[in-house]
Every structure is written in structure tokens, then in C-alpha cells.
Image (cartoon, helix red, strand yellow):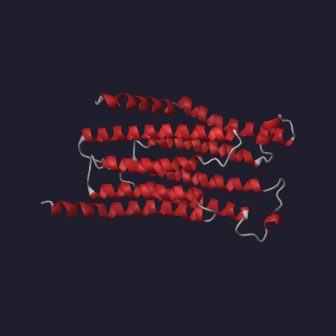
Amino acid sequence: MNRSIAWPERLYDRLEAAWLMPATQRFAEQSLVVLFLASLCVIELSRQGLLPGRLGLLVPTKHFYAIHIAFGALLLYEVTGLIFGLARSVANALGQQLEILSLILLRGSFEELIHFDEPVQWEAFVGSVVDNPILHLITDAVGALAVFVLLGFYYRMQRHQPISEDAHDREAFVTAKKMVALGLFAGYVIIGLGCLRQLLGGEGPLLFFESFYTLLIFCDVLIVLISIRYTSTYRVVFRNSAFAVSTVLIRLALTAPPYFNVLIGVTAAAFAVALTQAYNVFAPVIHAANTEQNK
């Protein structure tokens, strides 16, 4: 193995092994519960005016914010899994991106609760369409469900095939994807630290997932370009390139206004399903045609 890439690959393998350890997974899962309960307690202290000075100004006074915080942490957990899944399967990595999108839409539904007083006053939102949190909540939830259903079709339709018949090429391609994933992990940490600095400084808005998905687009394109080194087969290059389009759509959905975010997000999932079906049906036909031409 080339020494220039040996140590980064070992670093990636160690990070992945540490993440996949049962102890690490249990700690992460338990931390979500602790964070949610702690958030509720701190918010209640803020409501009672028991937090000192600047901290009291930073902490919100609505309990619904605790759901927002817990779901944000859950998404970070899922994003970490996505990074380490990138090296295993390009198709499954896109599926994980759509999983995260569905959770982001669900979090959007819960975020709308922040607009409600305690107890909820329904009359305040009657007659409004554009800025109606009730309608936003419903559409985000329905959109998340639609993405979930489309994901079921997407995973069921997958027919994983090696990028090359040569074992050395397959190993080299996995190594290259590990290098990309390691770079993505470094970007993930840098973006996270930047958002943490903003949070502690009382700045906003925090655009962690938007920034991460922007970086993910470049990583997807880079993997497509690397894959050409191991196969220049048109059908494979087309499929991997089109997967990157779904990532672009997901990124657009994260910053689109209400209703359009759901429309674009569901379109990203539907596009992935349609692409997979088209590939399964027509890739053998294209392969046969190319083989005939090369005779």
C-alpha cells in the first residue's frame, strides 16, 4: 500500500471502529435522553428567573425548545453514522442522507411548536396560511412520512454490484472513499466548532446542516470523479453522478421556504427511487449495447 495513504486509512479505520463500539453507541443513545431531560430542567430554571445574567438571556423559556435541542443532537448522531457509511456504499450513503432529511422534516414539525404559547391558543393562527405554524407542522410531518415510504422502495430496489471485477481495484476504491470520508469528518468537526462558537456568542442563525450538506455535495462529486479511475462504464458513471443530484436537492430543501422545502425534499427521494428503477431496468440493456459495439 502507498505509504502516503496508509496512515490516513488507519486513522479512519480507528475512528470508525471507535464509533461502532457498542459502548460508544450506548453512550450516545443515553446522552440523548440525558440531554433532553437536562434541557427541560434548564428551561424551567430560565422560566423561573433562576439562571444568572448572560446565561439567563441565552436560555429560552418555552419547554418545546427541549425537543428542538434533542432532535438536533439526534441528527448529529445520524450524520456521524452517514460519514462512516460513505466508504461502504455510495447507494446506501444516499439512503442515509434521505433518512436524515426525513428526520430534519420531523424536527421542523416539532420546531413549529415553539410558536405556540403554553397552553396552546389555537385562535391565534386561524385564517393564516403563509405563516401558519399548524400548516407548517402538518406539511413537514407528511413530507417526512412520504420520504420514509420512498426510502422503503429505494432500499428494496437496490442491487449492489462491485464497481470492478478486479479485487485490487475494489480495495483501492474503498481506500479512496475512506480518504474522502476522513476529509468530510474533518469538515464536520470544523463546521460544528464554528456553530458552537456562534451559539456561545449568542450569534445566529446556526446553519450546521446546510453547511454540512454543501460540503457533502463536493464529496459526492469527488467520489464520482474518483470512480472513473476504476470504471469508465457509462451506466455506472451516470448513476453515481445522478446520486449527487439528489444530494443537491436535499441541500436546497434545507433552506427552501415552508411548503417548498417539503416539495423539494420529496422530489429528491422520488428522484432517487426513479433513478434506481431506471438503472435496474435499462443498465443491462445499455451494457449489452456497449458490448455489441465493442465487438
Q: Residue at x 30, y 48 (%)?
A: 163
Q: Quadrant of the N terminus?
A: top left
| Percent of width and height locating residue 25 | 56, 34
Residue 222 appears anywhere in the view? yes
- In front of the other: 193 or 114: 193
Compared with 232, 135 (above or below) is below
Compared with 7, 216 (above or below) is below
| Percent of width and height locating residue 175 | 34, 37
Q: Residue at x 31, y 28 (%)?
A: 3
Q: Residue at x 33, y 49 (%)?
A: 225
Q: Residue at x 87, y 40 (%)?
A: 48
| Percent of width and height locating residue 201 | 70, 39
| Percent of width and height locating residue 68 | 69, 47
Side of 285 relative to 102 (left or right): left
Task: Report the number of numbered marks.
Answer: 0
- In front of the other: 35 or 254: 254
Query: Farthest residue in the bottom direction?
Result: 127
